[in-house]
Structures are given as structure tokens and as C-alpha cells.
Image (spheres, grey):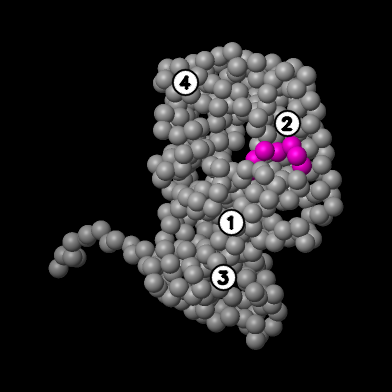
Amino acid sequence: TDPPQASTIAIPPAARPGDPLAAVDTPSLILDLDAFEDNLRTMQVLAERHGVALRPHAKAHKCPEIAIRQVALGASGICCQKVSEAVPFVAAGVRDILISNEVIGVPKLALLARLARQAHMSVCVDNVRAVEALSSMMVEYEASVRVLVEIDVGQKRCGVQTPDEAISLARLVQKLPNITFVGLQAYHGGVQHKRSLDQRQKAAEKTVRAIRGYLDAFARAGIECPIVSGGGTGTAAFDVASQVYTEIQAGSYAFMDTDYAGIDWGNALSFRHSLFLLGTVMSTPTPDRAVVDLGLKSTSAESGAPQVADRHDLRCVAVHDEHCILLADNRRSRPEVGMQLRLIPGHCDPTFNLHDCIVAVRGQHVEALWPISARGLSR
Ligand code: PLP
Ligand code: MN
């Protein structure tokens, strides 16, 4: 007899609102809403106390539902790292986006111009030709963007190398149509994860001194520089008090991965883990080994293997494509097949990029599923 006719089977969602956590299919990316909301408030309050704007980096989460909540709490807008990444945020109603990056090439500039007709867009520059191309594309689309000159304050990534270069680029921006010079992009990623609080503070101060050098040169040249944008989770407490940054771009603070949890926070700030990978123990081949059903396709591992939440007696010793290998300190610690475990990812940004949606959880129940709409949008 013939086999029954094939028909497409719809894969059910990992969870539905109202489900108990125990019913969530795995692997899933879980957001603990209570911890998440605390984190959002902590950073917003910190920024407001110092009169500094918070423009959270959305590359951390790529999720419009999260950005909308950050803006509702008082964020001045968001950052995106890529032009295409900004598209779902604009579609969701976010009206002020800084592309904290250089945008090069016709397809990207054209997309930026189209976005700029719907939202206030800003972009970074560090090159004369790029400024000219930006201006002419904006003219072509009858759009306009604000421009930050990126300065290299020690990260050795992008950015002009001297105040003279920054000033001549700013003057070019002022001269050309449909682009407006608004200030400086001054981000130093290398400082963010320095382990010791003291070393991080010193490095942040060094960054601030570099920025002051630029600001003094701009003042001497008579060029107003209303915005200085930069900073991240690791240096936020220093950045807001620096008297130099007018807005900070922290992203990871909302989630706290193990990488950030591993740095010394002193009593400066406290963020809670809100982001977890939910996995199921699928095999227990030996008395001390448990294998969980999530691997590199569900979690980043370049910043270390994920850590089992609240279980210091379980260590993740290997991450394969679709498996995590856990070793238990002793037989009593080893979880049984079928048990669910929460793992904390090493690095939030690339982990979000592996998932279609976030399972937002309140206590022990699913509250909502939020699409990670900018997932994969890296053009
Ligand atoms: N700003 C820029 C330009 C970045 O590249 C990053 C992260 O890499 C951030 C801000 C946010 O940093 P964090 O997630 O460490 O807060
Ligand atoms: Mn990161």
C-alpha cells in the first residue's frame, strides 16, 4: 500500500502564555521578567540621577518588545550596530536610532535613507569618502541623518586618530547637505570586561581624558559638540559621572551573562541574571555525567561554556553542536533524564542571535513570547 500523503506538519511553539515553566519545550531562551525589569530600572535610574541619557544597545537582544520597554522607561532611543538590524525596531515604533557604526556601500546607505524618512536616525563616520557618499544618498532620498564622528579612544577598532582629523570631518559634515553634525561617538569595548573594578575605573578615566582632548580641540575650533555617546555595562557607573558622556550605550546590563557576572562590581551597581537557556537532561550515561539538549546552536560559547544556574555542583565541561556535557561533583548531584535545567549563557548578544523568540517568564509561568525580529540581520 502507498504511504499516506505527506503534508506539512506545523511545529508547535515552544510555549504558550500561561504555560507552567515545566511545560516549555527545550532548548528555549528564557527571560525572567522580574529580574529583567529590575535591571532596566537600575540602569535608567543611574542615568537619570546623573542627567545622562540612556540609549541602550539593541544589538544585545535584537528584540523590539524589549526596546519598547526600555524606551517606555525613559531611554532616549536605542542603538543598533547594523542598518538592517534597525528595520524591525523602526517597524515596531522606535523613533530614534543611532547606528553606532560606520555604514559603507550603496545598499546600506539606501536602506538607511529609507529608515531616515520614518525615524530619527544617527550614524557614525570616520572617513571623508563615507561622509560624501552618505550626504549624496540622503539628498537622493530627500532624507536627513545626524552624524557622529567616531573617535578611537583606545579600542583600536574604528574611529579617527586625532582631534584635527575629527574637526575636519565635522566641518565636512557641516558643509554637506542633508547630514547634520551632532557630536562624537566614543566607545571603548576593551575596557568593559576588565575584571578588577579599580582597573576598570582607571581605564574608563583614561578614555574620558582622551575624549576631553577632543572636546577641548572642538571648543578651540568653535564647533559645538552637543552629543558624546559611548560607554557600556562594565563602565556605566563611571561613564555617567564623567561629565563627558551625554548618553550611554549599555546593552548587556538588561541580561547579565556569565562574562559580565564574572567581573568585580564592588557595590557600584547590581544587575541580576535575567537570561537563561532552558534545557532538558537527555542522557545520563555515567554516574557523574549528564547531557543536556542544547549546544552551540542555542548558546554562544566563545566567552566560556554556559553555567548551570544555582548549581555549583554541576559544571559544563563541553559544548557540542547540540549537546552540553555536565559533570556532577558527586552521584547525588547528577540530575536525572527528563529534568529541566536553567543555564546562563557566557555572552548574551550572540546567544540571542541564535533564537527566534524569547519565552518571557514571570515566576513559574510563561507570560509572553517575544520574537527576536532582528535575529540574523547583520547587513
Ligand atoms: N556600544 C557599542 C558601539 C558596542 O559595540 C557595544 C557592545 O559591544 C555596546 C555599546 C554595549 O556594550 P555592553 O553590552 O557591554 O553594555
Ligand atoms: Mn557583547
Q: Is residue 312 above or below residue 234?
A: below
Q: Residue at x 64, y 58 (%)?
A: 42
Q: Residue furthest bottom?
A: 332
Element marked by disc 4: helix
Q: What residue sits right under mark 2 in the picture?
A: 152
Q: Residue at x 77, y 61 (%)?
A: 267
Q: CA distance from mark 4 to mark 3?
A: 47 Å
> Closer to the camera: disc 4 or disc 2?
4
Task: Residue type at mark 2: give it.
Answer: Asp
Q: Is residue 96 visible?
A: yes
Q: Which numbered circle lies on residue 40?
A: 1
> Closer to the camera: disc 1 or disc 4?
1
Badge 4: few (under 14), some or many (20 or more) residues near its Cα, within 10 Å? many
Q: Position of residue 201 (x, y in %)?
A: 81, 48
**Label 1 residue near ligand 1, CB within 8 Å:** no
> Closer to the camera: disc 1 or disc 2?
1
Element marked by disc 1: helix
- In the rendered structure, are the residues bearing label 3 and label 1 in contact, judged by CB atoms less than 8 Å apart? no
Q: CA distance from mark 1 to mark 2?
A: 28 Å
Give the mark nearer the N terminus: 3 vs 1: 1
Q: CA distance from mark 2 to mark 3?
A: 39 Å
Q: What residue sits right under mark 3 in the picture?
A: 342
Q: Position of residue 270 (x, y in %)?
A: 70, 61
Q: What residue sits right under mark 4 in the picture?
A: 138
Residue 247 shown in magenta = yes
Give the mark nearer the N terminus: 4 vs 3: 4
Q: CA distance from mark 1 to mark 4?
A: 34 Å
Q: Position of residue 359 (x, y in %)?
A: 46, 63
Give the mark nearer the N terminus: 1 vs 2: 1
In the image, the segment drawn in magenta is 242-249
Give the mark nearer the N terminus: 1 vs 4: 1
